[in-house]
Image (tube, rainbow, N blue to C red):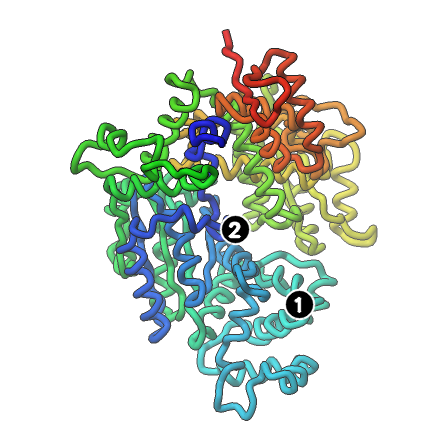
Amino acid sequence: MVSIETIIQRSVNPFDPISFKTGNFWRENQEASLTVDSIHKEAMVEIETLVDQMAQDHHSRTIMLLGDSGSGKSYLLGRLKKTLKPKAFFAYIPPWSDHEWMRRHLLRHTVDSLMQVPEGETDSQLMLWLKSLSAFTNRSLKQRIFDDQVWTLLQSNRKKFITHLKKTYQSLGIAQADSFFGILYDLTNPELYPTACEWLRGDDLSEDSLQDLKLKRSIESEEAAWEILANLGKISTETQPIVLCLDNVELVGMGSGGSLNLQPLLSLNTRLHLEGITNFLIIINMVKNSWKTLVQRIQNSDRAGIHKFIFLKRIGLDEAEAIWANRLYPLHQQVSIQPLSPIYPLTRQDLEEKFPSGSKTTPRSVLHLGRQLIETYKIGQPAPPADYGSGLKLLWVEEFKKTQKKVAKISYFSAPERIQMLQTAMEALRLPVAPKFLLSDKLASYSFSYQLSGESESIGVVWSEDPNMKTFFFVMDACRRIIEQHPKTPVYLIRAEKVGESKLKGYKLFKELFTGSPHRHITPHLDSLHYLATYYTLVKEALAGELVIADQEISLTRLQELIRETEILHGCILLQDLGIVPATPKTDSDPSQPEAAPQNLDAKDFILNMVINQHLLGRETAIDNAHAKFDTISPERLNQLIDELIQERKIDLIGPLNDPKSQFISRVPQV
């Protein structure tokens, strides 16, 4: 019979910070068993009450959700999404880098979230929303339009569909009504649905795609994006509220110098209420101290646009003990005789010593303490100093795989987002970067310039993936003008999209400018975007105080140091093509392809880093975890890799040689 002590020793530390990262609460389902319902219960009730009120009056409202770093703000949003799923549609809005793209950013990520299929449903939120509109549920109609017979009739007649919606919502002032309702019609066609979603989220579509949608232009401006977002609310008066969760908003405008400035957002929030746009619940999530430094600079009229402030309280020892019990429960379930305490081998006294009577703390601090105590328990003595490099590598593999799953094409991100990601990676590698290289106001956010070490001249970078050839011509013309003004400055065009046909003006300019030297055309692989997006996610978490490795909250400066020490970004082919990091020789298994292991970390490196991070681990546990990350490698081969690490004296083997199930592997002390 295996003891609870053995189970704990061979398992991954249940309080390891990688396991309690929250991230994008929409895409990462939370384990219900790990939720302590009493934590932030008052906040949950307050928000649910507002949602119920909105279901009756449909008036938009704004909540400011404030709490300490580590208090569980993002986790609370995930609980809300799960709890209120039958009552509301949810959208996750990450911070944006450029205020000049704020409204397009809001629209883009609102539609992205609405395109997700909720747990237990077969339709996306977007289709559930469409089917719930009053135009299709009005019982005064002779027959509900979504009944098969009538719906089939309308589906075969685009004009009747648009006319019906225009008549139903004629008093609401719907902007671009023909185009907007035409897009809603196209959402009902499985073949056009993806393209219609791309238009709705603000992608600059090709001429062929626009023709398929029977439209003349894409959403080209901030005001047009705002009108479409407003339309979603205006026609939703009989549907569930749309909850826009703006996470870590203290990071907005990060690409404009990094200064804390919420005024543009709060002014837009005020506009939403003044214009009477209905059915949006705005939840603005930020650290309490950030709000305190900002509040005096906010205009009084914009403060009035915030209907409710909800402060997340710190937790007491009973709630802390419940967090521990939830984390340890899966380990306790593996033994037939249950320990006397649900938090064994931890004790209430451990909490009381760390958090004296009457004091309050945060969920993150409780998890940190649990990790330290389990670590000491596993190895029988205080653990050696953490290896943050190995911790970052483990976290990188985890986040990289999430990014691969989420980002299926380069156009997933907007031009300013891609540029900001690339710029942020260069800053980590200590390269001087100047934003907005192009002179065009509309296209400046597509560009920046940088300087290589030891070089006096800058290099301009332009990243354009818009498939629309008119936009491509404007980009090429902007490149021509900047090249004429700075003839000694090389310009690198990053573009995976097609460059058009030989008869087009944009194509001719492209051939004139980017054939030969010194200007270059670089074709990025999707894998490179995965590198940039993964690092950018970690940067945002570091700036928000949400990035934890081992026992330490990692600042941006520390993250940049670790990125340089581990050389993780050296695997990014785009950075290699730009001359930022050394090029790696191509092999039969091309590391630039998505199927390659992230950062060229193979399973052997992963196992070593896992042992370094955990100090002591069951051999089978190591194989199971490695196989979950590298599923193309067989357990037998992973077993061989462990033998190689033992022979290389990088890890030690503990236990009987003839019984792998009873074996442990541990970190070899480093001199």
The span from disc 1 to disc 2 (Cα, nearest Å) is: 33 Å
Q: Which residue appears at 67% of the width and 82% of the height?
A: 152
Q: Which residue is mark 2?
A: 27
643 in relation to 28, above or below: above
What is the x, y in percent for residue 359?
19, 36
As drawn, is 51 to the left or to the right of 390? left
Q: Which residue appears at 53% of the width and 81% of the height?
A: 136
**Residue 20 seen anywhere in this rendered image of the structure:** no
Q: Which residue is mark 1?
A: 216
Residue type, numbered disc 2: Arg
> In what element is the residue under mark 2?
loop
User: In front: 294, or 640?
Assistant: 640
User: In front: 556, or 323?
Assistant: 323
Mark toward the start of the polypeptide (1 vs 2): 2
Where, by quadrant of the figure, is residue 259 drawn? top left
What is the x, y in percent for residue 644?
67, 17
The outermost residue toward the top is: 671
Badge 2 local density, few (<14 within 10 Å), some, or many (20+)? some
